[in-house]
Amino acid sequence: MGHVKGIGGLFFRARDPAALSDWYRDRLGVGGGCSADDSAPVNQWVWTVTGGPLVFSPFKADTDYFPADRQFMINLRVDDLDAVLAPFRAAGEEVITKKEWDDPSVGRFARVHDPEGNPIELWEPAQAG
């Protein structure tokens, strides 16, 4: 029996796919041609990521954890939440943080939105100690 080894892609609709792809690449280093590992070869179609935990979880249809008019929320694992948030803050864009989201055993969280209003949760995992 075969086994799924990970997520191979994330595809979603956009009003302006080219502009949104540019935004993700420029603001977050996400998407084709990006690599989380500077030593990895770059491929224009692939985003090379660093292995680690990934939560795959359906939420109740009436959840208030992310906006009701959105069917999904992307969660991106980061190594330095404050550094990743700096360009959002410099641009005067909304950054949402809540004390109740953070947990010393899980990590720190923040929420931002892409130009088309899709929620993006940024997660800095707790350091193994």
Image (tube, rainbow, N blue to C red):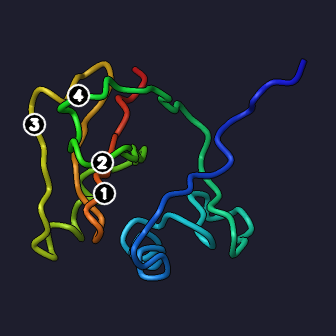
Return the x and y of residue 89 as percentages of the image width and height: 14, 67
Q: Label 3's element?
A: loop
Return the x and y of residue 57 as percentages of the image width and height: 45, 26
Give the spatial CA distance, label 2 vs label 1.
7 Å
Left-right relation of 16 to 8: left
Q: Are marks 1 and 4 in contact (CB under 8 Å)?
A: no
Camera-side residue of 67 and 30: 67
Q: Residues within 10 Å of mark 3 (few under 14, many from 20)?
A: few
Disc 1 marks a residue whose amino acid type is Asn
Disc with the residue nearer the chain's start (2 vs 1): 2
Q: Are marks 2 and 1 in contact (CB under 8 Å)?
A: yes
Q: Label 1's element?
A: loop
Q: The N terminus appears in which quarter of the rendering?
A: top right
Q: Label 4's element?
A: loop
Give the spatial CA distance, label 3 vs label 4.
20 Å
Disc 3 marks a residue whose amino acid type is Lys
- In the rendered image, the vertical position of residue 84 relative to residue 33, given as above or below: above
Residue that carries the numbered disc 4 in the rendered image: 62
Give the spatial CA distance, label 1 vs label 3.
19 Å
Residue that carries the numbered disc 1 in the rendered image: 118
Residue that carries the numbered disc 2 in the rendered image: 70
Return the x and y of residue 119 as percentages of the image width and height: 28, 52
Please give the name of the residue rendered at 24% of the width and 48% of the height, measured from the top-left corner: 69
- In the rendered image, the vertical position of residue 26 relative to residue 125, given as above or below: below
